[in-house]
Image: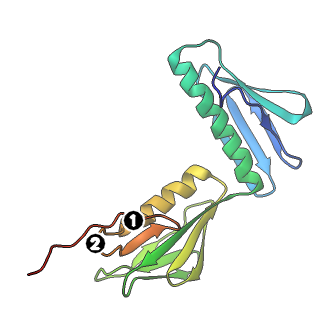
Amino acid sequence: MSRIGKLPIQVPAGVDVTIDGRTVAVKGPKGSLSHTVAAPIEVTKGEDGVLNVVRPNDERQNKALHGLSRTLVANMITGVTQGYIKALEISGVGYRVQAKGSNLEFALGYSHPILIEAPEGITFKVESPTKFSVEGIDKQKVGEVSAKIRKLRKPDPYKAKGVKYAGEVIRRKVGKAGK
């Protein structure tokens, strides 16, 4: 048994889970998400609002999909109840971010400002010109949008200028030695 896959998924009050064949739909106070589980894996609804993810046999592929499927369903339930937040920071002279409606406008040392539009289900929150966060109910989408924003100007290893995740430690390099 997969250590992660065998754990039951607790469904909190206020969350409605419907299972239609291989599709699991979760509806909660923050929104609704759905996911189609991979072929050999099945999700069953037990008593007391507990979900169980089961696999037919112990093939290597099924073992991998077992833990993955359980985690994806659990992440959907967490998303519709609490949501996900990814905080980012900008460091560097003249580097800043500002909100333009629901979008973000970055000044990252290029000759032009960069405008990032918020995809459906994602909201941006700007705390200061150097701190902002990406919020949403879909963990995968929040991480993907955060990674795309970080990719605009990755932190450079010499001066650590650029966009980085909050709490991320940038591995620094020593510059060339002068005479």
Mark 2 closeness class: few <14, some 14–19, many ≥20 residues within 10 Å: few
Name the side, left or right, on which 55 lies relative to 103.
Answer: right
Marks 1/2: CA–CA distance? 9 Å
The image shows residue 127 at horizontal and vertical percentages of: 60, 81
Report the amino acid beneath label 2.
Tyr
Q: Are marks 1 and 2 in contact (CB under 8 Å)?
A: no
Which image quarter is the C terminus in? bottom left
Residue at the spot x=74%, y=46% of the render? 77
Residue 118 falls left or right of residue 48: left
Residue 159, how many percent across, how many down? 31, 76
Label disc, if present, on residue 39 of the rendered structure: none
Q: Is residue 90 above or below residue 93?
A: above
Q: Quadrant of residue 122?
A: bottom right
Identify the image quadrant of the N terminus.
top right
Q: Is residue 158 left or right of residue 146?
A: left
Toward the bottom, the furthest residue is 94
Give the farthest residue toward the left. Answer: 179
How busy is the neighbourhood of tag 1: few (under 14 within 10 Å), some, or many (20 plus)? Answer: some
Three-letter amino acid code of the residue under disc 1: Ile
Q: Earlier in the sequence, mark 1 or mark 2?
A: 2
* 103 relative to 160 in the view: left or right: right
- Reading the image, the residue beneath label 2 is 158
Label 1 secondary element: loop
| Viewer can see residue 122 | no
Label 1, on which residue?
A: 170
Residue extending furthest toward the right: 48
Picture quarter containing residue 29? Answer: bottom right
Residue 65 is at least partly visible in this image: yes
